[in-house]
Every structure is written in C-alpha cells, then in structure tokens.
Image (spheres, rainbow, N blue to C red):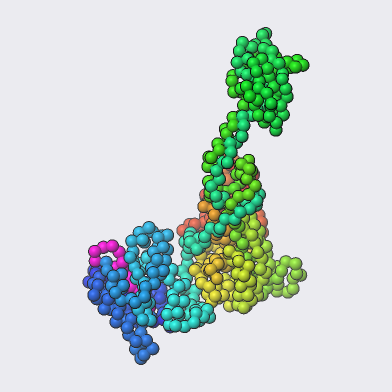
Amino acid sequence: MIRAAVITISDKGAAGLRQDLSGPLLQEMLRKMGAEIVHYAIIPDEREQIRELLTRLADTPKGTGEQGVELIITTGGTGPAPRDVTPEATLQVIEREMPGLAEVLRMEGYRKTSLAVISRGVAGIRGRTLIINLPGNPKAVREGMEVLIPILPHALQMLRGEELEHHANSEWRMKGKMTESYPMLSVEEAQERMLALVRPLEPEWGPLLEALGRVLAEDVFAGMDIPPLDNSAMDGYAIRAEDTIGASQDHPVRLRIIGNLAAGYTFPQAVEPGTAVRIMTGAPIPPGADTVIRFERARRDDDTVEILEEVRRGRNIRRAGEDVRRGELVLPRGTLLRPQEIGMLAALGRAEAWAIRRPRVAILATGEEVIPVDQPLAPGKIHDANSTSNAAQVLRYGGVPLPLGIARDRREELSAKIREGLEQGVDLFLTSGGVSVGDFDVVKEVLAAEGEIHFWWVNMKPGKPLAFGQIGGVPLLGLPGNPVAAMISFELFARPAILKMLGRKEWDKPTIEAVLEDAIERKDNRRHFLRVRVQKEDGQYTARLTGPQGSGILNSMVQANGLAIIPEERGELAAGERVQVLMLDWPEGVIL
Ligand code: AMP
Ligand code: MG
C-alpha cells in the first residue's frame, strides 16, 4: 500500500479562517486509489515551515519500524500572490526535479481554464519520496488527481527501485474499489479528455482520388493562370468589336471568315479589320480579335458572316487567370478535400497531393458467446454484429478498419490480439464488450494491467460503461457490448477521435430541433440518446421513437435516422415537447 501525506498550505486555513476542502478531497481520492494517508497537516504559507515539514516527512526512514512516506501532495501556495511560496520551499527540499509532472498538470489544467498556467507548482524527488505541488482550489485538486492517477503507480514503482511490472501495477489499481476511483463523467468531459490524447496523424503523399475526404496538408499555390489563355465562352465568331459599330438588322456588317478554330488549337494569323474566325467554346482568342459573337446572333453566308447588332468589346471571352491567378494561394492547408477541391488540384496540373493519412483502426470483439458471422450458431452463441457495424462506421468516417477478430473473455487472448494490433501499427483500438462490471469483463483488466485507463464511466444511456485508455501509446476505446450501445458510443467517441486524427477541426454532427411524437419516461438522470425517425411535416421536424429502446435492440437503430438527446436534468417528457435530435443521417427527404 502506498503511504501518502497530504499537506494543505494556506494562511487562512492554518488560522482556522477558512475550511480546508482540498486537503480532505485529496485524501479521499488517494484512499480510493488504494493509498494510506499517514500524515495530514494544514500549515501557513511560511517557507521555512513548509521546507521543514517536507524534509521531515521525506527523510523518515523507509522500511524501518516507523515506515516513511513515499508520496507527499501539497495543495495551495502555488500562485503568484506575494505569500505563495510552496514551489520555492519544495525546490529547496527536492533533489531531483520531475518537471514533466508539473507541466502535464498545468497543460491538462489549461484545457479547463487558462488560469491554470499561472500555477507555479513543481514536482520532484527527495530520497525515495515523490513530492507534488497542486494548486489550492478543490477543482484544480480534483482535475490534477485525475491526471496523476494513471501516472503515479508507475512513478512510485520505479522510485522504489522495482522493475516496472505491469501486473503489480494492475493489482495496485484494481484493488477493491477500482470502479469508484474513476469518476462518472459527462459526455462532454469524457469527449474532451479523450480528444486531449488524440493527435492528428502525419501527412502522406499520394494520388488525388485517394485524398478525397481527407485534409490537405500543404498550402497549394497556383503554378499557372486558369484559364491559361483568353478563350471563347461560346461557339461563334471571334471578331473586332469596333467592326460592328453601326450594325443593325437593316444594315448588317459583313465580315470575311478567314478560318475555323477548334478548342485545343491556336490560330496562326491575326484577325484584321473586316475579318472573323469561326471559333468553338474553349478555343483561344486569336490575336487581333477582342470579342466573340454567338452563332445565333450572326448570319453566315459561305465565307462571310453578317453581324446584325453592335457588340460590346470583350463579350463572351473568358479571361486568362479569371478563375485562378498564378502565384495565388488557392487551397490552404487544412482544407477538407471534397470533389471540387480535388478538381481544382487537377486543373492546376497536380496528380498528387499531401493529405493527412487515414487512421488505421483495430477492431476487436470480446465474449465467450460471440462467434464469427460466417459460422453457424451453436446454443448460447450469438453472431458478432459489433465488429462489422463498427468497421462500417470506421469506413464511413474515413478510417481504415483492421478487424482483429474475437477474443474470448481471457486476458491472455485479448492481450495477444492487442499486441498483434500494436505490431501492425494501428492508430486506435476499438473493442466491444467486456467493459461492464461483470466477472468476465476483461477489457478494463487488460487496460489497467498493460496500459492505462483514463475513464470508464460516462453518464449516458446507452453506453454508460465506456472504457478509454492507452495501451502501448495507442488510444483504446472500450465500447459496450450491446450492439446499439456500441454503435452510439462509436458515434459519440470513436467518430470524433477518427476525425481529429484525420486533421479535421469539426466533428459535431448536425443537430435539429424536433417535436416529439411519443411521451418519454425516465428513471435516472443520465443523458439519453433515443433512437428516432425524424420527418418533416407541415414545415417542422417531428421525431418518433423507433420502437423498444433496449441497448441490444439493433432494429431501433435500423429504423432510426437520428438520436433524440434527452438532457440529464430533464424529467419525463410528454408528446408534443421539443427536443434536440442529433442526425445520424441527413437523408434527402429530411432537408428543411
Ligand atoms: P458485455 O459488455 O461484454 O457484458 O456485453 C453486453 C451484451 O452485448 C451481451 O449481451 C453480449 O452478448 C452482447 N455482445 C457483446 N459483444 C457483442 C458482439 N460483438 N456482437 C453482438 N453482441 C455482442
Ligand atoms: Mg462480454
């Protein structure tokens, strides 16, 4: 068991003028991690006093009858106020700094509030004791601890001089109340934490069509004008506008046709006064000509043409560079490559481009009962629906699915498959099943033992048990086993992760407001995602439940085009109330 000390550093706290909330919170979180709190004190912001206490606690011999402290966490005194001296006192005590710990606390804190950067907390080691400064407010303490929980076991193990052995780590964390040490997160908190650990992937050079749907990873400047030359916008006659002055139905101007010019060729001669060239759309304007008159507006007679009206100079001519100017920034990096951008690259003479590569997403089903779709069912078995639905979702959102098959509920089996994925260099693992609190839920065990878990409770329905962690540096999302829950958790978590890896900046799906056609009961305060069919009726959207909403009823997904979002705080809903609906699809018939 870890022996930890908690020190609250606060003038007001020490004088009894303010209740210490952070110290008790820290103790509670440490205890849930399986630590024993051997010392707790509230002391004022006095450098000497802090230094003295830290030194005494760290220097108590370990392994003796007295048993020393291996971890000291301070809270308070890290800010810029004149009395804040915790970091200075700590620096006097520690022998070896651990700047990474302090920085990750600031970095993660900064995601929540930019004020986190003014915390000056430090971390480091004295002898065999790890000392970490956290800011004083309870929110920062909670967030800081959430960052530290996956890191501390490794750090302390190494500090004790033990081999980094995954097994020991897992036992440490699995002890007893494993589930409770992971707080229930809101959907947004969980998404945010997950996305904080997901990075855009590298660019890759490849053929244009393979870049469709991906993000451009270079600034594309025009190497040429488009169009490259002035050319005709019509089939007609290239003429000089001044030749048509005074022309009318009654007094047509007669021009001599000196040639015929198709698109793709140039005309060898100039158009002199009194002459015209028959010209096709896209053909370059011959020298001397400044205007094109359409066939329909002229009357041909053998090798002459009659013009029946005055024509404005420059008509029906597409100017060189009118679309794109040479040297111009046409497509900035970060542009999503749709067919039109691909077309633009092609027009610029580019056959290849730099685009962020597609993430390779390993897909793994778990469960003794789950068998491959091409095998006949035996009693007690079900077909593996999730691997295929998740793979289809990966494809749909631009990833490359790599199905790794089914792992039975044995740690070694799942481990082996994950290793296989790591060897193949995957960017994301998706597992399904094995994340609830049943006896055979292996995903979180493997994650705890061989990687790290960041969270696994999300306050949503379906999909409450949802593991997120990292293994071998690769993010892993442990989706629930129920097929609907697996798909919805994919939409809410795997999809944003994939899109972020793809270099996208936006991942919210369109949400609309619709009138509920059914009443909705609820017995909890989770956020519900109900499968609905959205229709447009009389100028407004209506949403009808797609039948029973069990998280295993795949048909509720098959019938649905959207997910009605029932917020945590809403009570029962009557038919006719308005709800937000996240559109899974945006079929043509639904457009407003
Ligand atoms: P679990 O999260 O492993 O407890 O699974 C929850 C439920 O989802 C159980 O009824 C499983 O049989 C079912 N399930 C798990 N994996 C799959 C899968 N790949 N395809 C279809 N159903 C599954
Ligand atoms: Mg299972």
Viewer-side residue, 489 vs 303: 303
Q: Which residues are magenta?
A: 71-83
- Residue 142 seen in this snapshot: no
At which x and y percent is residue 405? Answer: 67, 69
**Which residue extends farthest top?**
250
Q: Is residue 268 above or below residue 529?
A: above
Who is closer to the viewer here, 71 or 200?
Answer: 200
The answer to which quarter of the image holds residue 159 is bottom left
Residue positioned 68% across, 17% down in the render: 275
Q: Is residue 72 magenta?
A: yes
Horizontal and vertical percent position of residue 8: 30, 72
Viewport quadrant of the C terminus: top right
Q: Determine the residue located farthest toward the bottom in the rendered image.
A: 65
Q: Is residue 407 visible?
A: yes
User: Is residue 414 depicted above or below 360 in this figure?
Assistant: below
Q: Main secondary structure of the magenta part?
A: loop
Of 324 and 448, the residue lying toward us: 324
Q: x%, y% of residue 362?
A: 62, 65
